[in-house]
Amino acid sequence: MRVLFTSWAWPSHYMPLAPLAWALQAAGHEVRVASQPRLTPVITDSGVAAVPVGPDLDHDEVRGRQMAGLSFSSVPRVPAAGASMDTWQPERIRRVRRVFGTFAAYSDAMLDDLASYARFWRPDLVVYDPTTYAGPLVAAMLGVPAVRHVHGIDVTYQARQIVPGLIRSMAERLGLDEVDALGAATVDPCPPTLQIPADVSRIPVRYVPYNGPAVLPGWLREKPALPRVCVTWGTSTSRLTGPDTFVPARLVQALSAMEVEVVMALAEQDVHRLGEVPANVQVVDSLALHLVLPSCDAIIHQGGNGTLLTAALHGVPQLVFPQIPDQMFQAERIVLAGVADSLQPDQFSESEAAKRLEAILTAASYRSRARALREEMLGQPAPAEAVARLEQLAAEQ
């Protein structure tokens, strides 16, 4: 079987798909990953063959053009789990369309090249990141199943009323009528406790963390003398929302007064924002979270799916400071599970953050629920077990 994966050129959108690509390759299937050229090193580092398609885009330029001055604080909150945008006023919907227009612009830029390659290679199946709409469009063109692969909590499902209008002109370009961007099935690495109701055919898989090539540092071979707290901020939040929202810099002094060891695991572009740090804070650049979290008693983060699920997999209680709508939605789900606490931007203060962290470190309920969620995740089928479902889906088509 030939399987074509596709994602627009943002590493955190491709990396959650890599474990399924490994499973397919290990089962003897041919796998290719198509994206803009900028993502090629990330794809090849994961051990999969890359197919560059379309031009590279300047993300800040595309986002600025599509959002046209719209700030994230002005973007409507994601509908509650199980709800939709059906009753929303047109202006609210227009704002969300402008946000998702960024994803549509990437798909539009890569569509013709991706379609040309797909006609040449003739895949039996197309697996796509949920915001890479070129994937289901090309699958429909070929008449093969399109398989949506979510990153965790299915926040993009909540925008299902928005997408058809964004991709209609692309579908027409391929000679197609309306295409279902939700695909024939959804590969789902999110545990049921956290997932939202959705009218899709889910293929459950165990979450496997992947952040790219990883090296275990020597200091992680010893147990910490004090409770260890990991602080991380993802790879793009400060870039999207600006330096004023960089919470780790505001946390440093509050954490210095606590009897804890702090590991600041930050992206390279965020390290310089910290300034001088106290003795109980260690700053590490781009350390893979799945290496440090087994030794941690708590994690503080921004609410990204990868961070949230990696912490859950290791049974680590969480303190979440979400900044943008999808992070706020995801924070609500993990708090509802009893594994985390959360502060919205207008609720945040250094003293309140320290108070919430102290509660997470001392309350047994957070630890017991985190362990239960970990057991649930470990009980999910391995990605290798999803291969048979995909083979059947391709055969039926």
Image (cartoon, helix red, strand yellow):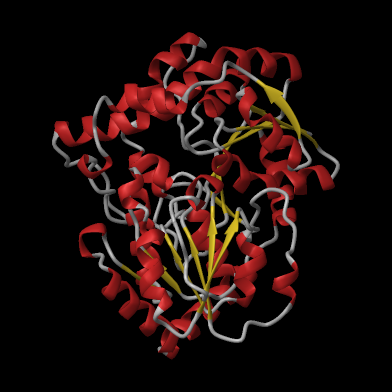
Furthest toward the front, the residue is 276
> Residue at position x 52%, y 36% from top?
183
Q: Position of residue 36 (x, y in %)?
A: 60, 24
> Residue at position x 26%, y 58% from top?
345
Query: Quarter holding the N terminus?
Result: top right
Q: Is residue 104 above or below residue 223?
A: above
> Residue at position x 42%, y 82% from top?
258
Number of numbered labels in the structure image = 0
Asked if residue 374 can be seen in this view, the reply is yes
Q: Position of residue 284 (x, y in %)?
A: 60, 60
Query: Quarter holding the C terminus?
Result: top right
Q: Quadrant of residue 357?
A: bottom left
> Residue at position x 39%, y 59% from top?
249
Q: Position of residue 290 (x, y in %)?
A: 64, 63
Q: Position of residue 166 (x, y in %)?
A: 36, 23
Q: Is residue 262 left or right of residue 156?
A: right
